[in-house]
Image (tube, helix red, strand yellow):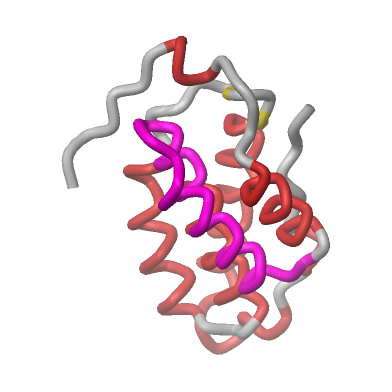
Amino acid sequence: MKAINVNSSDCVGTIHPAAVKGMQLFNAGEYWLAHEELEEAWKEENGPVGELYRAILQTAVVYLHVTRANYNGAIKVYGRVQKWIKPWPEVCRGIEIGQLRQDLDAVIAEVERLGPDRLAAFDRSLLKPVRWT
């Protein structure tokens, strides 16, 4: 995949309705359904903002793997999501991407600390919501 080039103008505008629904599902802990809605927004959005939605949907996949105690899946998708989540500023279209990055990093740190044999003991309160205005 080629690098995502983010301009400040990409962060001006409204959030795709499917992305809003996806983030609401994400925040309700419905990570698979969130993925589906965010995927719709990703496919329909033109330009780099689609990759912003892709970053959030891949974060939902990481969280889904964590809730299913799938250590290898969580680690693999976390590595992959970095190329979509890193290029964005702290806030884009009102979505607090910087906070989401921090929350995701904290989740993976705990996943790695627990390891594959103890991941079922993961404290789900570490799975923080996506924040946006």
Q: Is residue 93 left or right of residue 78?
A: right
Residue 23: x and y in percent read: 70, 51
Which of the 4 image quarters holds residue 77? bottom left
What residue is rendered at 38% in x and 29% in y? Answer: 87
Relative to 110, residue 55 above or below: above
Residue 91: x and y in percent read: 61, 22
- Extreme residue in the top direction: 8
Q: Depth check: 9 or 77 in front?
A: 9
What residue is rendered at 63% in x and 33% in y? Answer: 15
Q: Is residue 117 left or right of residue 80?
A: right
User: Which quadrant: the C terminus?
Assistant: top right
Q: Depth check: 52 or 45 in front?
A: 45
Q: Is residue 27 left or right of residue 80?
A: right
Q: Depth check: 120 or 27 in front?
A: 27
What residue is rendered at 77% in x and 69% in y? Answer: 123
What residue is rendered at 62% in x and 57% in y? Answer: 107
Q: Main secondary structure of the magenta part?
A: helix
Q: Can the viewer see residue 109?
A: no
For the record, the magenta segment spans: 29-54
Residue 120: x and y in percent read: 68, 85
Which of the 4 image quarters holds residue 90? top right
Q: Can the viewer see residue 122?
A: yes
Q: Is residue 70 left or right of residue 126?
A: left
- Extreme residue in the bottom direction: 117
Number of dots carrying numbers:
0
Q: Depth check: 110 or 48 in front?
A: 48
